C-alpha cells in the first residue's frame, strides 16, 4: 500500500506541472479532465504526506524522550502527550487512507436517472411517490444538482403512478445509488375519514446515465417506436402534435417514454437515454445477484423487491433496514435533509469492502 500511496504523491506533482503550463486553457476538455483528477488525487496525496509527517515527528519525539534525564519529568510528560497525539492522528489518517483506496465504481461520478413507481396502496402510494420526488428534488437543490423531468404519469389525486427524473451534478449516481429498492410509508391518508394508519409502498430505481461512447449497442431492428399526444399541461400545442415518444426494446420488453419536450426529436433522444440506462441496469442487477449468491452484501442488490426503508409519519421516524439506522426527524428528511442517511449508507458500504478485502495496516507496510 505504501507504494500505491507514493504513486499518488508522484501523480500530484505531475498534475501540478501539467496544470501550470501556459497553453493548458487552450484545450478546455483536457483541462477539466486534469482538474477533476487533481482534486481526487490531492485528497489522497495530502493525507499520505501528513501521515508521513506524523510518523517522522513521532519518531523524533520518541528519540528525544529516550535521551531525557530523570530531572526533565515535566518535559518528558509533554513529549509523551505529543507522541500520543501524533499516534492518534496517524491512526485516523490510516483509516481514512484505507477508505480512500477502496475500489471505486466507475459510474459513481456520472449523472443519474431516478425512477419512482407507485406500488401497493392505490392513490396513497401515488401521493407518496410525489412526496419522494419532492424530497429528492429538494436534496438536489441543497447540494447544487440540476433536475429535469423526463416522463410522468400523474394519478387522479395529484400524485404519480410513475415519474422519471434526470439529475445532473457532481457524483450524483455515487450518492444516490443505494436509494434503489422498496420504500414503505405508514401514515393516515388524507382520504381516510376514521384516522386509521395505512401502509403503502413505492419502488425507486437509480440508474447511471449511459456513456455515449461506451453504452450498450442496440440493434435498431429490436426497437418499436410509438408516438402519441402528450397528456397534462402544455397549452394548445401539446394537444395538436404527436410529440410524446415511447420506445420498446422488443427482446427484453423494456419500455421508456418521454413527453417533456415539445420536440418529438428531443423526446426520442431522451427516451433512448432512459432505455439504454434501464437495459444497463438490468445487466447490472443480474451481475449483482450472481455476486450475492457467493457473498451476502450489507447494502443489498438494489432490487426493487427489497424493502429498504420505512417512513413512519405518526412517529416522525425514518428507518433504513439495511444498516439499522433510525432517525426521528422525518419532516426534515422529507424536505430534502437526506445527507445523514446517504452518508450512513456510503460508510456501511466502505466498511463492508474493508472487511471483504481484509485491508492490512499501513504500519505493516501493506
Image: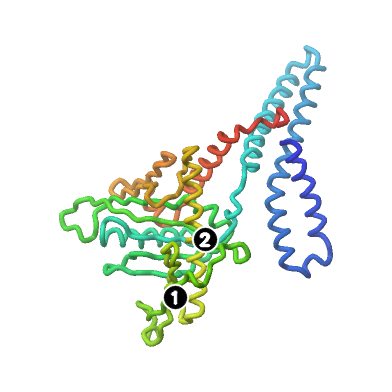
In percent of width and height, residue 345 lies at: 49, 45
Between residues 219 and 239, which one lies in front from this camera angle? 219
In percent of width and height, residue 236 lies at: 37, 87
Query: Residue 24, located in which quarter of the rendered image?
Result: bottom right
In percent of width and height, residue 284 lies at: 51, 53
Image-based side of 354 in relation to 333, left or right: right
Q: Residue at x 35, y 47 (%)?
A: 310
Image-based side of 365 in relation to 113, left or right: right
Residue 112 numbered tag: 2
Image-based side of 63 in relation to 345, left or right: right
Q: Which residue is the extreme one toward the top?
A: 70
Residue 225 numbered tag: 1
Residue 128 numbered tag: none
Query: Residue 259, located in which quarter of the rendered image?
Result: bottom left
- Up the image or down, 258 lies above or below 263; here it is above
Between residues 290 and 348, which one lies in front from this camera angle? 290
Q: Residue at x 73, y 30 (%)?
A: 365
Q: Quadrant of the N terminus?
A: top right
Amino acid at each position: 500500500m505504501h507504494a500505491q500511496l507514493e504513486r499518488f504523491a508522484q501523480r500530484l506533482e505531475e498534475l501540478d506541472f501539467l496544470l501550470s503550463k501556459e497553453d493548458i486553457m487552450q484545450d478546455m476538455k483536457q483541462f477539466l479532465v486534469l482538474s477533476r483528477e487533481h482534486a481526487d488525487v490531492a485528497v489522497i496525496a495530502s493525507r499520505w504526506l501528513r501521515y508521513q509527517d506524523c510518523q517522522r515527528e513521532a519518531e523524533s519525539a520518541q528519540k528525544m524522550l529516550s535521551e531525557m534525564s530523570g530531572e526533565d519529568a515535566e518535559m518528558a510528560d509533554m513529549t509523551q502527550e505529543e507522541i500520543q497525539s501524533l499516534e492518534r492522528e496517524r491512526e485516523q489518517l490510516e483509516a481514512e487512507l484505507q477508505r480512500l483506496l477502496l475500489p471505486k465504481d466507475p459510474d459513481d461520478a456520472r449523472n443519474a436517472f431516478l425512477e419512482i413507481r407507485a406500488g401497493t396502496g392505490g392513490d396513497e402510494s401515488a401521493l407518496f411517490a410525489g412526496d419522494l420526488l419532492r424530497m429528492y428534488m429538494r436534496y438536489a437543490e441543497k447540494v447544487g444538482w440540476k433536475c429535469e423531468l423526463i416522463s410522468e404519469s400523474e394519478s387522479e389525486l395529484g400524485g404519480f403512478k410513475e415519474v422519471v427524473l434526470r439529475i445532473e451534478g457532481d457524483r450524483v449516481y455515487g450518492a444516490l445509488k443505494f436509494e434503489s429498492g422498496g420504500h414503505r410509508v405508514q401514515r393516515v391518508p388524507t382520504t381516510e375519514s376514521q384516522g386509521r394508519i395505512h401502509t403503502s409502498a413505492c419502488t425507486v430505481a437509480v440508474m447511471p446515465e449511459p456513456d455515449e461512447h461506451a453504452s450498450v449497442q442496440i440493434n435498431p431492428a429490436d426497437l418499436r417506436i410509438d408516438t402519441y399526444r402528450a397528456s397534462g399541461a402544455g397549452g394548445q400545442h401539446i394537444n395538436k402534435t404527436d410529440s410524446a415518444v415511447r420506445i420498446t426494446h422488443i427482446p427484453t420488453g423494456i419500455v421508456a417514454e418521454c413527453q417533456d419536450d415539445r420536440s418529438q426529436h428531443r423526446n426520442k433522444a431522451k427516451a433512448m437515454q432512459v432505455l439504454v440506462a434501464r437495459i444497463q441496469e438490468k445487466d447490472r442487477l443480474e451481475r449483482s445477484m450472481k455476486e450475492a449468491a457467493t457473498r451476502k452484501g450489507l447494502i443489498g442488490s438494489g432490487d426493487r423487491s427489497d424493502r429498504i426503508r420505512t417512513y413512519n409519519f405518526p412517529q416522525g421516524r425514518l428507518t433504513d433496514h439495511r444498516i439499522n439506522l433510525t432517525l426521528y426527524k422525518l419532516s426534515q428528511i422529507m424536505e430534502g435533509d437526506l445527507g445523514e442517511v446517504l452518508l450512513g449508507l456510503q460508510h456501511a458500504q466502505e466498511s463492508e469492502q474493508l472487511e471483504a478485502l481484509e485491508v492490512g495496516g499501513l504500519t505493516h507496510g501493506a
